[in-house]
Amino acid sequence: METLLGALLLAGLLAGLISWWLLPIMASLLLAVPLSALSALDLSRYGRGGLRMDSPNTLREPAIVTKARTERALFKGMLAVKLPVATSNLKSVNCLSFKDIMTSALL
């Protein structure tokens, strides 16, 4: 539909019936469908490394993110470790995780 309207505007421009000030509108209407079809193409297949729009943060992870990831893994490991905890009668020893101890301390 847009291309048809663009073609009609072009015919009107060439016939002198429509002002040349409508040239940008005519061009956008004529090119709407072809540009839409081109935008659906996967351009990453073409070219040497593909056409990627990366930011510096996706190419090289910032140091603070790397440090946070490392600390999170260490803390997760600490939560998984079972710590021996003596009961009141001292005859048996229960094993609680760090997470259980922290949860009971908050109660």
Image (tube, rainbow, N blue to C red):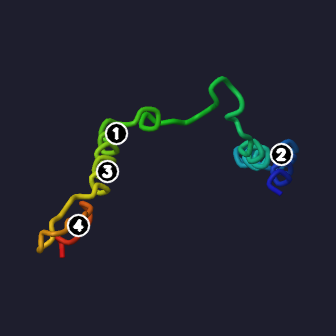
The answer to whether the residue labelled 1 contacts the one labelled 4, judged by CB atoms less than 8 Å apart, is no
Which numbered mark, 1 or 4, is in the foreground of this view?
4
Q: CA distance from mark 2 to mark 3?
A: 70 Å
Say whether residue 29 is left or right of residue 86: right
Q: Amino acid at mark 3?
A: Gly
Q: Nearer the viewer, residue 105 or 31?
A: 105
**Compared to 82, does 14 lie above or below?**
above
Q: Secondary structure at mark 3?
A: helix
Which numbered mark, 1 or 2, is in the foreground of this view?
1
User: Which image quadrant for residue 1?
Assistant: bottom right
Which residue bears the numbered disc 1? Answer: 66
Upstream in sequence: badge 4 or badge 3: 3
Q: Is residue 26 visible?
A: no
Q: Secondary structure at mark 4?
A: strand
Q: Residue at x 20, y 65 (%)?
A: 93
Q: Secondary structure at mark 2?
A: helix
Q: CA distance from mark 4 to mark 3?
A: 19 Å
| Circle on res. 94 | 4
The answer to whether the residue labelled 2 contacts the one labelled 3, judged by CB atoms less than 8 Å apart, is no
Which residue bears the numbered disc 3? Answer: 77
Few, some or many residues within 10 Å of mark 4 (<14, 14–19, 20+): few
Which residue bears the numbered disc 2? Answer: 10
Q: Secondary structure at mark 1?
A: helix
Q: Residue at x 87, y 46 (%)?
A: 11
Say whether residue 95 is left or right of residue 61: left
Upstream in sequence: badge 2 or badge 3: 2
Image location of residue 70, percent across then percent down: 32, 42
